[in-house]
Amino acid sequence: MNTLIFRTIAPLLTAVMLVFSVFVLLRGHNEPGGGFIGGLIAASAMAIYGMAVGPGAARTALKAHPLVLAGFGVSLAALAGVLSLAFDVPFLTGLWTIFRFGEGEVAISTPMVFDIGVYFAVLGTVSAVALALEDEEGEV
Amino acid sequence: MEATPDIAIALVVLLPFVAAALAPLVHRLIGDFAGWVVALAPPAGFVALWGLIGRVSEGEAIAVAWPWAPSLGLELSFLVDGLSLTFALAIAGIGALILLYSGAYLKGHRQGRFLGFMLAFMGAMQGLVLADNLVALYLFWELTSIASFLLIGFDHTRQAARRAAIQALVVTGVGGLALLAAGVVIHNLSGAWELSVAGDLKGSVAYPLLVGLTLLAAFTKSAQLPFHFWLPNAMEAPTPVSAYLHSATMVQGGVYLVARMTPHLGGEPIWNTTLMVFGGATLLWGAVAALRQTDMKLMLAQTTVASLGLLMLLLGAGTELAVTAAVLYFISHALYKAGLFLVAGAIDHGTGTRDIMALGGLRDPMTVTFIGTIMASAAMFGVPPLLAFFAKEEMYAALTLGQFQSLLALLALVIGNALLGAIGLVLLVKPFMGPLLPTPIAAHEAPVAMLVGPIVLGALGIFLGFVTTLTGELSVAPATAAILGVGVETHLRLGIDFLGLPFWLSVVTWALAIGLYMRLDVARTFLRRVASGTGWSFDRGFDWVYFGIVRFGAGVTRLLHHGRLEFYLLVVFVALAVAAIEPLWLMGGLPGGPGAVDLRFYEWGVVLLAVVGVATVVYARSRLFAILALGVQGVAVAMLYLLFGAPDLSFTQFMVEILSVVILALVMTRLDLVTADPRPLEDWARDGAVALFGGIAVTGLLWAVIEGPFDPRLAAFFDANSVLAAHGHNVVNVILVDFRGLDTLGEISVVMTAGIAILALIRGARRPKPAVAKPVPEVTTEPKPRPRRTRKVAA
C-alpha cells in the first residue's frame, strides 16, 4: 500500500476529507452529520495521511499531540455547558445567538460549540490510536 | 466588642482557614516571627466568641444559617449554646498559645506549612463544635481527621510517623463514616438536617442503631477502648500538635459528640451503661498504661486516654451533677494537659531528651518551665483551690448518690484519679528535683514564646478555681443545661466542705496517689513484665486487621483481575447474553418468532451480503481476511440503516466499519500474530457456543422489542421540540448535543480515556523492544519492516 500513487494522492485526499469533515460537522444540526461522524472522517483522513507520509509527519502536521486535541475537545464541550451557568440556567442548556447578514443568517450556539468539542475528542482519540499503531519504532 | 452573631461565627470558623492559606506566605515574608503573626487569628475568634457569652449564659442558643445547597434543603447552620461555646473558647484560647509556641518550637522546620496545617485543624475543630447542620458536622469531623493526619505525619520521612498518621486516619475515618450514617438516620427520623430541631429520638425503632453509630464515631475519635491505640501512637507528631490534639481538640470531638447527642439519645439504659462501662474501662486502662511509660509524651498520651474515659463515664452517668463535673473536668483537663505537653516539649527542646529516668534537677536551669509544671501537675493531682479540685469534688459528689452501678463507677474514678495523680507527681518530681543529670544538650531555658503557654494555662487553671462561681455561671451551667436540655442553676462556689464525703474521697485519692508514687518503680517493672508476657497489643491487632484487609483486597483483585484476556471477554459476553435473555425467559416475554418478512429484492440482497460476510468471518483461514469480511458485514448493516431511513446512523456506521478494519489490520501487522487460528478444538467449541448464545440472546431481545407495541411518546416529543426548543432539524444530532448533552459529554470523556489507555498499552508493549540489541543504528526507518510483515500476513 506504500505505492507512489498512494503517496501522491493521499495528501490531496486528506485535504478533501478534512474539509468535508468540517462541512459534515457544521451541517449536523439540521442535516445528517455532526461532530461524531465529522471527527471520524477527520480521523480517517489523518490515518490515510499517516500511512502515506509516516506517522511522525502526520503528527507534525497536526501541530499538537492527538491526545491534546482530544483533551481540548472534551474541555471545550464541558466549557460549552459551563457557559450556561453564567446565564443562571442549568448546566448544558443551549444558548443561541443569531447574526444576520442581509439575506442570510448565521446561528452561533453552545450546542454548536459542544459539537465542535465532540469533533475534536473523536478526531484526537481515534487518530492517536491509529497513528500509534502505524508507528513502528518512534514515539507514541 | 459586640459583634453580631453571624459575623462572629463566620470569623471563628473561617478565619483559621484563611490564615491557614496565608501562613506559608507569611512565613516566607517575615520568617521565624510568623508564629507571632498567625497566632493573632485565634484570639480574634476568641474575642468574637466572648462577645456572645453574655447572651449564651442567660440560656439563649444563638443560631445562624447561610444558604448552602437550597435544592437539597441544606443550610450551613451553626448553633452557639453553652456547650459549643465552652468548647469553642477552649479551642481558640489554647490554640493561640500553641501557635505561638510552635513558632519557636519548629524554628526552620517547614514552619509555614506546619502553621497552615495547625490553623486548618483549628478551623475544622471550631466548625465541628459550632455546626448545627448534620452534614456540616460530618464535614468538619472529617476535616479534623484529615488535618490531624497531616499533622501526625508531619515528619513524613520517618516510617513511624507515617504509620501513626495512617492509623489515626483509618480509625477515626471509620468513626466518621458511622457519624455520616447516624446523620442520615437522624434526618430520616426527624426530617430535619439541623440537630437542634431533631428532638427526642429515643422512641424510634432505629434507636439502638443510632446509639451504636454515634458511640462508634465518638469512641474512635476519643480513643476509647478498644480503639485507644491510635492516640499514643499519634505522639509521633511534633509536640505542639500533641498538646493541641490532646487538650481541646480532636480527641475531645468524641466527647463533644456524646454531649451534643445526650438530649436526643441519652437517658436510656443502653446509652448510659455502654458509656459508663467503656468509659470506666478506658479510664483504668489508660491510667495503668501511663505508669508503664518513662517517655514524658507517652505518659501524657496514656493519661489522655484515661481522662477521655473519665469524661465518657461522667457523661454516661448523666445526672446533673455528673454532667457539671464533666464540663468542669473538660475545662481543667484542657488547661493542664496542654500545659504539660508544652512543658514536655520545652524540656525536650532544652535538654534533648524526654525520658524521665534521664532527667533530674532541672529546677535551676529551667525555672520558668518548672513553675509552669508545678501549676499543671497540681491540677492533675487535684489540689484545692484549683479548678481541677472542684471538678473532682463534683464527680465524687455525683456518684455517691447512686446505687450499686454508680458505686462501681465511683471506685473506678477514685482509682483512676489516684493513678493520674501519681503520674502528675512523677512528671513534677522526676525531671525537676534531685541532682542535675547530664543530658544530650546542656539544659537551658526555652525561648519566651514557648514559656507563655505553660504559664498562662497554669495561671488560668488557678484563676478559674478562685472564680468558681463566675465560671459556673458563664460556662459550666449553660453547657450543662445544653447537654441535659433543661435549665440548670449553678451551685458552684469557692469553698471546701470538710465534712462531706467527696472531700474525704479526695483525701483517699491523694493518699493512694502518693503511695503509688512511692512504689512506682515496682509497679512499672511489674506492668512491663505483664505487657511483654502477653505479647499481644491492640496496636498489633490493628495491624492484623489492616493488613488482613489489604491481603483480602489483593486476593479479590487477583481473582477478578487475572490478566487473561480471553476470560475477560468470555465473562463479558456470557453476562451480556444472560442479561439480555434471562428477564424475558423468566417473565414469559420470549418472542414468538418472525412473522411475515416483507422485503424488496435489493433489501434481500443486502441481507445476503451481511450473511455472507459473517459466514466468511467464521470460515476465513487468515485473520486479515476475517477482518475484511467483518467489514463487509458491517457495511451491509450500514446499508440496511440507510434503506430503512436512518441516514445519520448509517453514515456513522460506515465510518466506524472502515476505521475498525483499518485499525484491526494495523493491530494485526503490529502484533505479529500468527495468521491462522491457533485455538485447540475445545476452546474453539467453547467460544463458538458463547458466540451463538450471545447472538441468539441479542436477537431474541430485539425481536421481543419489535413485537411489543411501539410507544411513540419519545419520538413525538423530540419531533415536536427539536426545532422549537433546540433550533435543529436533525433530531439525532439535537438529542446528542442538546437534549442528552450530558450523556455525550460523559461519552466523549470515556472515548478520550480509552484512547489514553490504548496508547499506554501500545507504549507498554513496545517498551521491552529497545532492550534487544540492535545491530546497526537506524539510518532510515521508512521502508524496511512493513513489506516483511505484509508478506507474512498474506501467507
Image: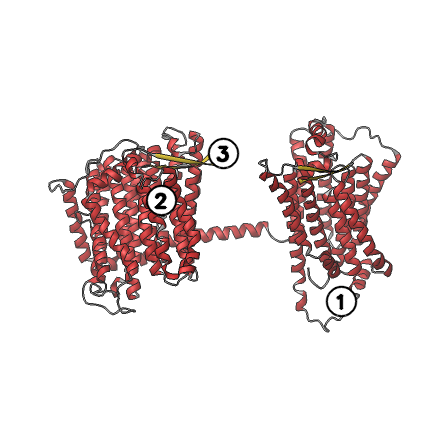
Residue B594, position as x, y percentages in the image? 78, 30
What is the quadrant of the N terminus of chain B in the image?
Answer: top left
Classify A134 as above or below B591.
below
From the viewer's perspective, tell me whether residue B135 is left or right of residue B591. left
Instruction: Characterize the local packing of mark 2: few (<14), some (14-19) or many (20 or more) Cα atoms within 10 angstroms.
Output: many
Q: Earlier in the sequence, mark 1 or mark 3?
A: 3
Instruction: Characterize the local packing of mark 1: few (<14), some (14-19) or many (20 or more) Cα atoms within 10 angstroms.
Output: few
Q: Earlier in the sequence, mark 1 or mark 2?
A: 2
* Viewer-side label of 3, 2: 3
- Which label sits on residue B253? 2
Q: Could you tell me which chain the residue with mark 2 belongs to? A: B
**Residue at the farthest left position:** B499
Task: Indicate the secondary structure of the residue bearing disc 3.
Answer: helix
Confirm whether residue B354 shows in the render. Answer: no
Instruction: Characterize the local packing of mark 3: few (<14), some (14-19) or many (20 or more) Cα atoms within 10 angstroms.
Output: few
Confirm whether residue B439 shows in the render. Answer: yes
- Which label sits on residue B70? 3
Task: Indicate the secondary structure of the residue bearing disc 1.
Answer: loop
The quarter of the displayed image where residue B576 is located: top right
The quarter of the displayed image where residue B28 is located: bottom left
From the viewer's perspective, tell me whether residue B562 is left or right of residue B551. right
Task: Indicate the secondary structure of the residue bearing disc 2.
Answer: helix
What is the quadrant of the C terminus of chain B in the image?
Answer: bottom right
- Which label sits on residue B781? 1
All told, the count of numbered labels is 3
Residue at (16% x, 47% y) in the render: B384
From the viewer's perspective, tell me whether residue B399 is left or right of residue B50. left
* Viewer-side label of 1, 3: 3
Residue at (84% x, 43% y) in the render: B612
